[in-house]
Amino acid sequence: MTATPDEPAAGAATEIRYRPMRAEDVPTCARVLKAAIDDYSGRLNQPPIPADLGPVERIIAHVLATDPARAWVGVADDGVGGGERVLAFANAYVRGGTWYLAALMVHPSVQAAHVGSALMDRAQAGFEPAPGMAIPSPDAPLDTGLTSWGMSTDALQPISNALYAKRGIIARVPAWRMGGEVRRWSAFPRLPAGLRLVPFEAVAGDGPTGAERLEAMVAELDQEVLGFAHPQDHGWMAREGRLGFLAVDRGDGRALGYAYGSGTGRVGPVAAADPALHPSLIGIAIRETPVLGPVATWVLGSSDEAMRALLDAGLRYDGLPGLFCWSHDRHPFRRYLPAAMAII
Ligand SMILES: CC(C)(COP(=O)(O)OP(=O)(O)OC[C@H]1O[C@@H](n2cnc3c(N)ncnc32)[C@H](O)[C@@H]1OP(=O)(O)O)[C@@H](O)C(=O)NCCC(=O)NCCS
């Protein structure tokens, strides 16, 4: 039996054990996330995160399903009937040579007792490390083949930022959530004449090999821009109802950019071989997916053209910025707007 984390543990210092995350832990992990974030953001007079944890659960479940070795929970005895309660979790994923942390959350009742560090060790390793064993890290990737390590954080959260920076994954770029209605469409010019707009579904639906061809076109661009292909995350975007659009070279048929829009107004991810294409790509995502209401996206401080086009269009900064951390300064966020903070 797994108890909920909502009540703080009673009695003396809680002893935490670690084990791989299971699918049935996901709803409890989402509640740990809400408890952990609301606790510190409440102290900063920030509003709580939404009560509907469905989207959070779907992200945790996706990351778990695509890299189960890097999803771990910290559990304690629940004090009744030999059951356990999940009080902390980490889930990270590897795509190509990149390791990315989707979430690290520790219930407020057991914070500052090295639970977060212990979970990071396991999420970095992908296995239960024996005492004294070296953990793969940006300084010593061992035999993992990993070359880049990253995550996003909150700008006002010194503990997580310090925990990651000590491990060589340093906050480098601010990320603004931008939202609002488009007031000046001229901020989003049409594609240059040499490129044409093609919806993902037009490629995927074009004959028996269409889906394969789409995956290959997107993977080639992701490899160039991000350094890795991630068809599993494109699958998640499709399941979340996001619609993708390609900017295709009329000459050689290569994809030079893509952008996702959504009926909920969420824009992103956006990838471009040349960031000068970002304003056109964002415009395509918004024009091609009719939305009743405002649009919203994450824009990083390294995406000059996208940021300026969105401000020019009339969107506004919304809330406090996040930070993207990366293990070196050749991060991909000049040419890439992420899907979300937890899944790039
Ligand atoms: C952030 C969080 C995951 C860390 O887990 P934790 O178990 O509390 O942290 P740990 O005890 O393992 O480690 C914290 C480290 O940060 C260090 N630290 C704390 N505040 C610091 C500061 N202002 N500057 C530098 N280092 C600091 C601590 O000294 C400790 O390092 P040490 O082990 O070398 O002494 C946890 O506090 C949490 O869930 N917070 C709320 C939700 C959240 O912000 N999650 C991360 C979102 S990005």
Image (spheres, rainbow, N blue to C red):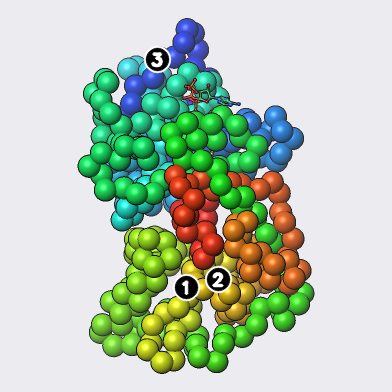
Q: Earlier in the sequence, mark 3 or mark 2?
A: 3
Per the image, label 1 sits on a secondary structure element best described as: loop
Q: Residue at x 25, y 39 (%)?
A: 142
Q: Which label belongs to residue 15?
A: 3
Task: State the separation of the CA atoms marked 3 and 1.
Answer: 50 Å
- Residue identifier under label 1: 273
In the image, taking residue 159 as reference, residue 181 lies left or right, namely right
Q: Is residue 294 above or below residue 159?
A: below
Q: Residue at x 54, y 62 (%)?
A: 334
Q: Is residue 144 above or below residue 106?
A: below
Q: Is residue 55 above or below residue 238?
A: above
Per the image, label 2 sits on a secondary structure element best described as: helix
Kind of residue at badge 3: Glu
Asked whether residue 35 appears in the rendered view, the answer is: no
Kind of residue at badge 1: Ala
Classify residue 3 by image quadrant: top left
- Residue identifier under label 2: 275
Residue 207 lies, in percent from the top left, at: 29, 88
Residue 213 lies, in percent from the top left, at: 30, 79
Kind of residue at badge 2: Pro
Q: Is mark 2 within 8 Å of ligand 1?
A: no
Residue 214 lies, in percent from the top left, at: 35, 77
